[in-house]
Image (cartoon, coloured by chain):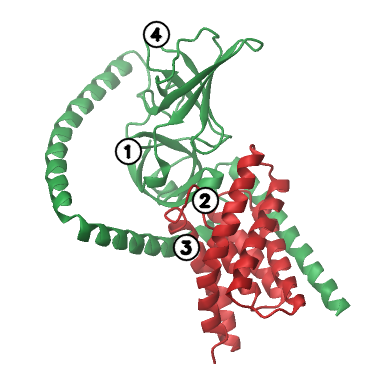
Chain colours: A green, B red
């Protein structure tokens, strides 16, 4: 009995050592912006099953909601179709203006703005505790670490690690994510937005007199090679002053409701 | 208990639990508390297995959970391996497994693994962490009841 218990403890120690070694391998791969081989194999093996589970869950939910709200769904469908036509016209105009901006930048010897290409992706995993989501696209579709991930409501997060067919996204609430941000004012106040847990972010302004008030819209500043300017990050909840550090801090509530998103876009 | 059934559950169970964790856990979120299907499986499977088997099951659950969530593998592997070990060690008490025991086991292992995670990667807010841990332990305990019924039907029914 004693020998068996000793054997069990040795097994625990061996497995813990393997775990530590795998963690080290993961950290080394993450520094290079890629997924470690073990995580990559696991993701490739489990993701197809996750997609099946996701599809079945969606189908069940849609079926049940369809039974109880056929009439309102029909009306909504008609309204959405007309809105889609109006959006298509607007989108053409935006693209023409964007092309004009790019040509003017080119004439001035500047590179074109980032985030022109939208790559659609499904959310195939969500870990609220770790402020991460997994997307169904990876390096095979041109995704690289640092790209912004958005949905119609605003910025969801930033790509952190990439595998060939999937990628991990650090959400705005993630403590290790820092994004250049600014207020939607004239002139705008610029600072750095940082995560502090789920649905909690803050922006530090180095200017203690920065013009910012509760309710202000916060957007990306565009001081980045990969994240374009003007993407909605959230709204200011409250403003705090720190006279000792000469800083003003605004607590920002992210605009994206993470629990409900299923489809997102990666901006390349 | 037929050996092939046992091995089938040991191999396929964590795989299905991982798929559920990725696909269903966000939909099952209740007042901000997310269920942990892998941990529930580790706890219930420990009732039907030996200590080394439960430990190994905990190791693979931690590996799957850490890899899929893209979080530190060391933290998850260590916490789940030890949770599996403690789950397997509980068989030394010679109690008769039932739904109540399965629920208590899942709640206890959730608490143990969360406490281990607390020391490996200290969270920013202790109050919130404690609230989440208690909530997750209760939620996982409830989820363990149908999982126990299913595993009992597969593993024990002649």
Tell me if label 4 and label 3 are in contact, CB under 8 Å.
no
Reading the image, the residue beneath label 2 is B33
Is A215 on the left or on the right of B45, as rendered?
left
Q: What is the chain letter for disc 2?
A: B
Horizontal arrangement in the rendering, residue B11 relative to residue B126 (left or right): left
Structural distance between the alpha carbons of marks 4 and 1? 29 Å
Of A66 and B96, which appears nearest the observer?
B96
Viewer-side residue, A155 vs A98: A155
Where's residue A139, x and y in %?
44, 47
The residue sitting at 38% across, 59% down in the picture is A54
Q: Nearer the viewer, mark 3 or mark 2?
A: 2
Q: For mark 3, what is the residue?
A: B19
Residue A199 point in image, percent of width and height = 48, 36
Residue at the (20%, 31%) spot, across then down: A91
Residue to which mark 4 is pinned = A187
| Rendering coords of residue A40 (x, y %) | 53, 56
């Amino acid at each position: 009995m004693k020998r068996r218990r000793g054997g069990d403890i040795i097994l625990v120690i061996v497995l813990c050592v393997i775990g530590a070694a795998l963690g080290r391998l993961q950290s080394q791969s993450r520094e290079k912006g890629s997924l470690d081989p073990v995580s990559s194999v696991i993701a490739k093996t489990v993701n197809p099953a996750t997609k099946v589970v996701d599809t079945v869950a969606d189908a069940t939910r849609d079926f049940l909601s369809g039974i109880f709200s056929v009439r309102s769904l029909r009306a909504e469908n008609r309204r959405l179709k007309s809105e889609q036509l109006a959006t298509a016209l607007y989108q053409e105009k935006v693209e023409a203006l964007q092309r004009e901006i790019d040509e003017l930048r080119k004439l001035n010897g500047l590179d074109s703005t980032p985030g022109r290409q939208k790559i659609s992706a499904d959310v195939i995993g969500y870990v609220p505790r770790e402020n991460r989501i997994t997307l169904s696209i990876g390096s095979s579709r041109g995704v690289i670490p640092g790209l912004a991930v958005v949905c119609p409501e605003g910025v969801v997060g930033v790509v952190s690690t990439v595998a060939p067919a999937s990628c991990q996204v650090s959400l705005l609430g993630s403590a290790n994510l820092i994004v250049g941000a600014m207020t939607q004012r004239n002139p705008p106040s610029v600072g750095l937005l940082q995560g502090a847990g789920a649905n909690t972010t803050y922006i530090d302004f180095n200017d203690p007199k920065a013009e910012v008030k509760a309710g202000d819209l916060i957007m990306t500043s565009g001081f980045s090679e990969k994240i374009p300017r003007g993407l909605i990050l959230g709204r200011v909840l409250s403003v705090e002053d720190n006279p000792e550090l000469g800083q003003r801090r605004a607590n920002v509530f992210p605009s994206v409701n993470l629990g409900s998103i299923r489809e997102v876009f990666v901006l390349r | 208990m037929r050996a092939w059934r046992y091995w089938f559950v040991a191999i396929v169970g964590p795989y299905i639990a991982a798929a559920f964790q990725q696909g269903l856990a966000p939909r099952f979120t209740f007042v901000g508390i997310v269920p942990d299907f892998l941990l529930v499986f580790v706890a219930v499977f420990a009732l039907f297995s030996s200590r080394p088997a439960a430990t190994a099951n905990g190791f693979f659950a931690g590996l799957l959970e850490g890899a899929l969530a893209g979080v530190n593998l060391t933290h998850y592997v260590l916490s789940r391996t030890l949770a599996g070990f403690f789950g397997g060690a509980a068989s030394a008490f010679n109690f008769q497994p039932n739904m109540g025991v399965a629920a208590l086991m899942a709640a206890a292992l959730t608490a143990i693994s969360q406490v281990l995670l607390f020391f490996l990667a200290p969270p920013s807010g202790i109050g919130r962490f404690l609230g989440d841990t208690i909530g997750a332990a209760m939620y996982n305990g409830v989820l363990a009841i149908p999982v126990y019924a299913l595993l009992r039907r597969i593993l024990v029914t002649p």
